[in-house]
């Protein structure tokens, strides 16, 4: 049985994709064995060269920068699937996942990876080792660090319940990041170097156990981009699987390199995903006035975000999650 399949969705990120694939292939040449000390949180690791049985699939979302041709020319061992149009992040990932799961020998694990990430040499092996040693875990995600060295807050999240979403939208999570109540969405009250169980990782780098994925199902294609990883983790946890944050592995994430090319569309989809998630998982258990207020709030904050973007120069526009 193959150890691992990697699915990367690309949209006009050719040069970043090249660097991502180089780091990924280097990471595939390492294996890790661990010897535990007194605490699970403290481990010593022996890194050795080995051979991985791994398939890499790049799903190109109708790029116009030659991404697919670059992969075929420079990485002939990589499978390239081309979408006829930009079908969205979740649907494109599903193209790759269906390809993986249709194989007669589906892999033990599937890594979802963005092309604007760079794995450390032993990153794959450590993530795989974590799932090997934690059979109750369906997903593990690393610590994501942005180019300026700051933590990518999206790498550890709680589900956006009505209360959690309210704290975030009105800015209480930014004012009181150390509060266990107000800082719940991005778990900012926890040490970023502390491993923890969480509600959701982020699709930029997320290792998933095949059995868990088969049980929970693929991405909900109603989400064009944003929110599909939260929804998947929600369904995984409903099936009894755990989701873990594992900062022993640190991955560089340039973030937003594809979405910033379509800043207005990305911002719209960010707020639409909030509405979709609420309607799918919380609306039926929320009083109708609460649902009305939540919907009105999402439209209000989304409209303000779009207006601010329109007032900025094109090269300074932000995507919804930035």
Image (cartoon, helix red, strand yellow):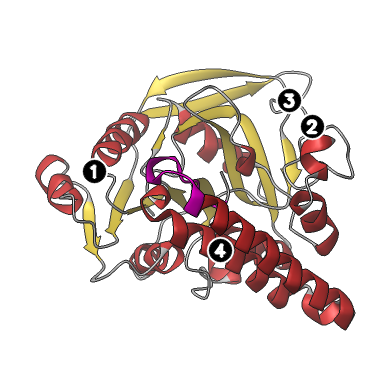
Say which of marks 2 and 1 sits in front: 1
Labelled pair 2, 4 in contact (Cβ < 8 Å): no
Using the image, tell me which numbered label, if any, was put on residue 190: 2
Using the image, tell me which numbered label, if any, was put on residue 41: 3
Q: Give the residue at x 85% y 58%.
A: 163
Look at the image and tell me whether residue 233 can be seen. no
Q: Which residue is mark 1?
A: 14
Residue 299, above or below 310: below
For the C terminus, the quadrant is top right
On the image, the x and y values in percent for residue 258 come to 37, 49
On the image, the x and y values in percent for residue 98 come to 38, 69
Residue 276 occupies quadrant? bottom right
- Please tell me whether residue 57 belongs to the stretch shown in magenta: no
Secondary structure at badge 4 equals helix
On the image, the x and y values in percent for residue 41 come to 73, 25
Instruction: Report how far apart the C-alphas of labels 3 and 2 lie in the structure.
Output: 15 Å
Between residue 174 and residue 213, name the one nearer to us. 174
Say which of marks 1 and 3 sits in front: 1
Mark nearer the N terminus (2 vs 1) = 1
Q: Residues within 10 Å of mark 2 (few under 14, many from 20)?
A: some
Secondary structure at badge 2 equals loop
Secondary structure at badge 1 equals helix
In screen coordinates, is 318 left or right of 212?
left
| Image: magenta residue range | 310-320
On the image, the x and y values in percent for residue 118 come to 40, 32
Mark nearer the N terminus (4 vs 1) = 1
Q: Which residue is mark 4?
A: 228
Q: Give the residue at x 44% y 26%.
A: 122
Mark nearer the N terminus (3 vs 2) = 3
């Amino acid at each position: 049985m193959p150890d691992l399949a990697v699915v990367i969705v690309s949209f006009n990120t050719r040069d970043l994709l090249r660097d991502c694939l180089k780091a990924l292939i280097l990471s595939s040449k390492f294996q890790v064995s661990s010897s535990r000390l007194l605490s699970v949180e403290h481990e010593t690791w022996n890194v050795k060269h080995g051979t991985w049985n791994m398939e890499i699939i790049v799903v190109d979302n109708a790029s116009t920068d030659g991404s697919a041709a670059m992969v075929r020319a420079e990485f002939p061992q990589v499978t390239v699937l081309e979408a006829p149009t930009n079908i969205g992040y979740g649907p494109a990932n599903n193209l790759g996942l269906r390809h993986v799961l249709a194989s007669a020998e589906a892999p033990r694990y599937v890594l979802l990876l963005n092309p604007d990430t760079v794995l450390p040499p032993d990153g794959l092996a450590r993530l795989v080792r974590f799932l090997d040693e934690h059979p109750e875990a369906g997903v593990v995600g690393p610590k994501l660090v942005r180019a300026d060295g700051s933590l990518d807050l999206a790498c550890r999240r709680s589900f956006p319940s009505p209360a959690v979403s309210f704290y975030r939208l009105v800015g209480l999570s930014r004012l009181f990041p150390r509060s266990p109540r107000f800082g719940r969405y991005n778990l900012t009250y926890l040490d970023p170097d502390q491993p923890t169980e969480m509600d959701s990782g982020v699709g930029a780098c997320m290792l998933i156990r095949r059995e868990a994925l088969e049980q929970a199902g693929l991405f909900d294609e109603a989400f064009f981009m944003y929110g599909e990883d939260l929804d998947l983790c929600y369904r995984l946890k409903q099936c009894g699987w755990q989701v873990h944050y594992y900062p022993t592995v640190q991955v560089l994430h340039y973030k937003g390199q594809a979405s910033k090319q379509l800043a207005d569309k990305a911002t719209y989809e960010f707020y639409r995903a909030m509405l979709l998630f609420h309607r799918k998982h919380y609306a039926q258990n929320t009083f109708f006035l609460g649902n009305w207020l939540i919907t009105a709030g999402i439209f209000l904050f989304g409209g303000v975000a779009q207006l601010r973007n329109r007032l900025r120069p094109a090269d300074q526009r932000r995507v919804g999650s930035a």
